[in-house]
Image (cartoon, grey):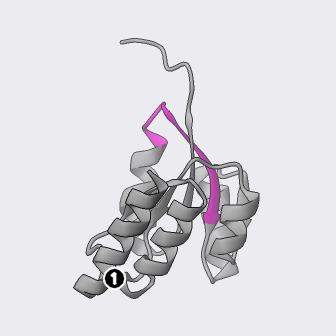
Amino acid sequence: MSEVKRKVKVGVVGCGVVATAYYFPYLMNMPEVELVAVCDLEPKRTAACKRLFGAKEEFQDYFEMLKRADIEAVLILTAPGTHKNFAIAAAEAGKHFLLQKPMATTMEDALAIKQATRKAN
């Protein structure tokens, strides 16, 4: 197996059950990923995820995390109704992103995400 030379710096928004049971444990086993920031509206969740999974920073404001954290990609693990705004903001900030399914709750929102992603290249 080849040595990992550079890690992708990742932020996660949404520190609920799905994130802690599935996504964070998987990320911990990926040598090519560095968990830089976690974000959730609930401070106890972000503090717990920072401590348990080794994130460097915690945020309660997603848009602040996009501005301040040294990240290249975002895992959006929030309720589907938030995906459009979070994904578009990530694209506009030049970040790669992964959306937990479903991508959007309407076709209009899905197309807006697609358009923002294409515009950001």
The residue depicted at 48 percent of the width and 71 percent of the height is 88
Q: Quadrant of residue 20?
A: bottom left
Q: Residue at x 43, y 67 (%)?
A: 116
In x, y percent, where is residue 16? 47, 75
> Bounds of the magenta span?
28-38
The three-letter code of the residue at mark 1 reads Asp
Viewer-proximal residue, 93 or 51? 93
Check the image and report above or below for 72 versus 51.
above
Residue to which mark 1 is pinned: 109
Asked whether, in this view, residue 47 is left or right of residue 75, the answer is right
Crowdedness of circle 1 by 10 Å Cα count: few (<14), some, many (20+)? some
The reply to whether residue 68 is in sight is: yes
Membership of 25 in magenta stretch: no
Q: Quadrant of the N terminus?
A: top left
Q: Give the residue displayed 72% in from the left and 63% down from the top.
A: 67
48 shown above or below 28: below
Q: Residue 15: tell me if it is visible.
A: no
Please name whichever residue, 114 or 18, is drawn nearer the observer in this view of the structure: 114
Picture coordinates of residue 105 (x, y %)?
A: 28, 86
Q: Residue at x 39, y 87 (%)?
A: 81
The spot of residue 78 in percent (x, y) is 44, 77
The residue most toward the front is: 119
